[in-house]
Each structure stands twice: as structure tokens, then as C-alpha cells.
Image (tube, rainbow, N blue to C red):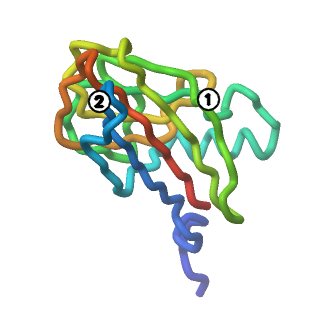
């Protein structure tokens, strides 16, 4: 009798770490935050296409903020009320880890009550999602953050 299992049952799940700093105009850090995030199902499709076909539309290239405070689930596909920016840089701090650096400037996304964060592929498909308590974005604060994906 053979055991029934899926490939995912026998692999380490993708993990991620979300961190950010909220900075006032004087450069003072007024909040810091670090926690795990949800790698959504479409990330697995993106990785499969990237490693098999080298599909450039599946490269993570954007960071987004939004207004949906529902907890992340693997079936999430969008960031609600999205404001997005290009990823500032990426690096490989250790084997099996890629860290994406992102920023939201003083003049960006003002007036939003931000509770939702996401990593987006070049084709705007959602790769990872995080929610946290609301931060009202005004012109007197900027965000500076990092998002690590651990393979």
C-alpha cells in the first residue's frame, strides 16, 4: 500500500519576514515593526514559472499598500485600494534568502489608512501579503522597510 501525500506535504513551506520603520521628516524613527507574513498560493505558480521558463513577468518588482484589514489567506490575489511603488533594491543576505527593500515617501499614499502590505510580481500578481494595525499616512511620515522571502 502506498502512502498518499502531496509534494507540498514533504517540503519546507516558503516563509517571509516583513519589517518597516515609520520615519518623521526630521529623520527620527517613530515606529518599528517586524513579523512574519503570508506567502500566497500564486507565489508558488510564480516560482514554478520563474525557475522553469525564466518568466520575467514573475519577478518581484513592486511593493504595495492597501486598506483591507482582513487577515491574509493563501488564496489572496489582490491588495485593496492599492498604491504601489517599485522595489528599491534586493540582496541575498544568506543562502536561500532574498531581501527586498522598499520605501514609501513623504508625498506618497497620503490620506490612506494603511493596514495592508503586499509584494507584487512584474505582472502585478500578488506574491506575499501582510496586515497590521492601521497607520494613517500623511505627509509628515515616510516608511522604509524590508521584506525577506526564505526558501
* Residue behind mark 2: 24
Question: Does residue 25 appear to the left or right of 54 in the view shown?
Answer: left
Image x and y of residue 133, in percent: 17, 41
In the figure, 1 relative to 120: above or below?
Answer: below
Image x and y of residue 112, in percent: 23, 18
Give SS at disc 1: strand
Q: Which mark is residue 61?
A: 1
Q: Within 10 Å of the Cα at label 2, are there few (<14), some (14-19), or many (20+) other Cα atoms?
A: some
Give SS at disc 2: strand
User: Considering the image in quadrants, where does the N terminus appear?
Assistant: bottom right
Question: Does residue 23 appear to the left or right of 103 in the view shown?
Answer: left
Residue at 46 percent of width and 49 percent of height: 39
**Which residue is more in the foreground, 119 or 52?**
119
Residue at 75 percent of width and 28 percent of height: 56
How many marks overall? 2
Instruction: Using the rendered view, name the quadrant where residue 101 is placed.
Output: top right
Image x and y of residue 89, in percent: 64, 36
Image x and y of residue 49, in percent: 72, 39
Q: Which mark is residue 146?
A: none
Residue at 59 percent of width and 30 percent of height: 88
State the separation of the CA atoms marked 2 and 1: 26 Å
Amino acid at each position: 500500500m502506498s502512502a498518499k501525500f502531496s509534494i507540498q506535504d514533504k517540503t519546507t513551506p516558503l516563509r517571509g519576514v516583513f519589517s518597516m520603520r515609520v520615519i518623521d521628516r526630521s529623520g527620527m524613527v517613530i515606529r518599528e515593526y517586524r513579523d512574519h507574513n503570508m506567502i500566497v498560493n500564486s507565489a508558488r505558480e510564480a516560482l514554478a514559472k520563474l525557475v522553469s521558463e525564466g518568466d520575467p513577468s514573475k519577478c518581484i518588482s513592486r511593493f504595495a499598500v492597501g486598506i483591507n484589514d482582513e487577515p491574509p489567506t493563501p488564496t489572496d490575489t489582490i491588495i485593496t485600494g492599492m498604491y504601489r511603488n517599485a522595489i528599491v533594491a534586493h540582496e541575498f543576505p544568506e543562502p536561500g534568502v532574498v531581501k527586498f527593500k522598499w520605501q514609501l515617501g513623504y508625498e506618497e499614499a497620503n490620506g490612506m489608512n494603511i493596514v495592508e502590505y503586499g509584494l507584487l510580481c512584474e505582472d502585478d500578481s500578488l506574491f506575499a501579503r501582510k496586515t497590521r494595525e492601521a497607520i494613517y499616512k500623511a505627509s509628515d511620515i515616510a516608511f522604509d522597510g524590508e521584506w525577506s522571502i526564505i526558501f
